[in-house]
Image (spheres, rainbow, N blue to C red):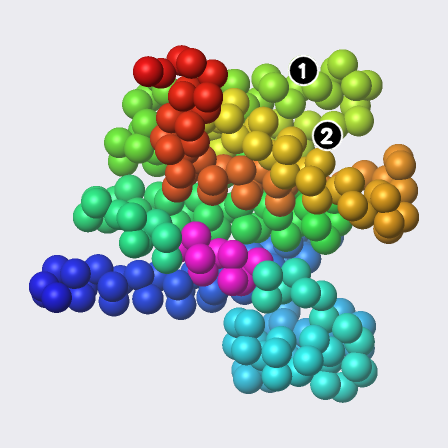
Amino acid sequence: MTQGSVTHEILTILAFIYGIIFGSFANVVGYRLPRGESVVWPRSHCPNCGRTLAAWELVPVLSWLWLRGRCRTCKAPISWRYPAIELATGAAFALSAATSSGNYAQLAVWWAFWLYLASAVACDVTSLILPDVLTLPAGAVLFLASALAGIRSWAMAAAGAAVGYVIVAAIHLVTGGKMGMGDAKLNLGIGAMLGPGYMVMAFILAAIYGVVAALPLRLAGRVKPQQPIPFAPFLALAAATCAFVGPELWHVYARLTGLAP
């Protein structure tokens, strides 16, 4: 094993650790931002009994497991979304590091992108709200970062953001507002990072993921026919799919449809 491969493996492990830490912060953003609260003050506390949490209760994933998903004081349940978002963010950070070509500027931008998506997912799952204060600044920052770091050209970043916004805006108009414009604003950042082609692929995948996830819940009666379902988790999962295996998916599609020999 060469020194370079060892360094790469260490970077991947550290990326996972930092990822779950940032995932924990995303959970804070997801709970507080839709409520108009500060994401840095006051200290983390149980939303049910109000007790300030000790440091050992804030260790990502492990604290939730140790506490068996309940507050140690009032025994109120702690949602599974906390460890799920932490682990998902850690995995995205680690995969980005593992597949990195050594361009640390691009890697940092991808990490910022995963933190953004984790925060958006936490907001949507918690409150069915994607706050403008999150999506609009992030869309602008990711557009600039994507182009400056060379992830996409200026034209492709702009086209991706525009396509992502227009897709949802069109559905919003056609359905009379059944799909919220928050998803359109979320797509500004996703499109800037993926470009127009993969943005379209991501939206199609997100729709498929959403149907696959929602159909069993509807059949089981856990989701009512008109009950809104957060779409950000499916957009985030689709964006990750395109980021990590997008070219491979496109080649499979091209072969199946005869677009490629």
Instruction: Identify the image quadrant of the C terminus.
Output: top left
Q: Residue at x 60, y 55 (%)?
A: 29
Picture layout, residue 4 above or below residue 136: below
Is residue 67 shown left or right of residue 91? right
The residue shown at (61%, 72%) is 43
Q: Residue at x 35, y 16 (%)?
A: 260
What is the residue that sits farthest to the left in this orientation? 2
Q: In the rendered view, would you say 169 is above or below 230?
A: above
Q: Give 248 or 73, whichever is nearer the viewer.
A: 248
* 165 vs 1: above or below: above
Residue 194 shows in this picture: no
**Rendered image: mark on residue 180:** 2
| Residue 74 percent across, percent down from the top left | 80, 83
Magenta residues?
85-93
Taking 101 as reference, is 252 left or right? right
Local crowd size for mark 2, using a 10 Å CA cut-off: few (<14), some (14–19), many (≥20)? some
Classify 73 as above or below 97: below
Indicate the position of residue 193 as horizontal and vertical percent values. 41, 33
User: Measured from the top left, where is residue 239 in percent x and y?
Assistant: 49, 37
Say which amino acid is labelled 1. Answer: Ala
Most common SS among magenta residues:
helix
Mark 1 and mark 2: Cα distance apart in space: 11 Å
Q: Is residue 91 magenta?
A: yes
User: Image quarter for residue 55?
Assistant: bottom right
The residue tagged 1 is 170
In the rendered image, which quarter contains the N terminus?
bottom left
Which x, y percent locates residue 130? 66, 40
Q: How many marks?
A: 2
Asked if disc 1 and disc 2 are in contact, CB closer than 8 Å, the reply is: no
Residue 187: name its quadrant. Answer: top right
